[in-house]
Image (cartoon, rainbow, N blue to C red):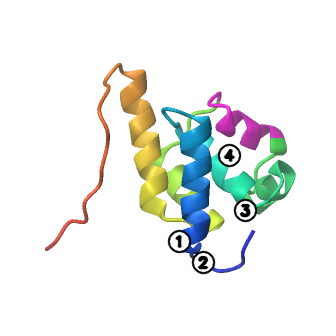
Amino acid sequence: MKSSSSKSTSTTINALEYMRANFPRPTFGQLVESLRICDEISQADLARKLGVSRQDLNNIEKGRTKVSIERAMKLGKIMGYGEESFARYVVQDMLYEAGLEVEVSFNKMTG
């Protein structure tokens, strides 16, 4: 995994291309897995960095463990990607599970 706090645009684009090619309607877990694979980091190494077991990370990636918005934001920060995009995927998962086929987007609040 790169040591910078923010990933390069090309890394993010490659990860998103991989995700779209492999997952038609990507979930939060698939986002984490795709970014991890594109960063060329093992599950064990990322789990250690996140402070969870490899099995816990595997359960997140496979959608067996639901993640709170706060935890998703923490994962985004630790992995060096935007907290907002990780939060968006968790909210998107909640809506899919509720049967709502809508796409979530976030806009910064002003004021």
Marks 1,2: beta carbons within 8 A: no
The label nearer to you, 3 versus 2, is: 3
Q: Is residue 63 highlighted in magenta?
A: yes
Dot placed on the residue nearer the N-terminal end, 4 or 3: 4
Residue 104: image quadrant is top left
**Amino acid beneath label 2:** Ser
Dot placed on the residue nearer the N-terminal end, 1 or 3: 1
Marks 4,2: beta carbons within 8 A: no
Residue ID at (77%, 62%) = 49
The label nearer to you, 4 versus 2, is: 4
> SS for tag 2?
loop
To which residue does mark 4 refer? 33
Residue ID at (58%, 40%) = 21
**Amino acid beneath label 1:** Thr
Residue 9: mark = 1
To which residue does mark 2 refer? 5
Q: Quadrant of the N terminus?
A: bottom right
To which residue does mark 3 refer? 39
* Label 4 – label 3 distance at C-alpha: 10 Å
**Amino acid beneath label 3:** Asp
Q: Is residue 72 visible?
A: yes
Specify the segment rendered in magenta.
Answer: 55-64
Marks 3,2: beta carbons within 8 A: no
Q: Is residue 92 above or below residue 88?
A: above
- Place of residue 15 in the rendered image (x, y in percent of width and height, measured from the top left): 61, 55
Dot placed on the residue nearer the N-terminal end, 4 or 1: 1
Residue 91: image quadrant is top left
> Magenta segment, principal secondary structure?
helix
Q: Is residue 41 above or below residue 100?
A: below
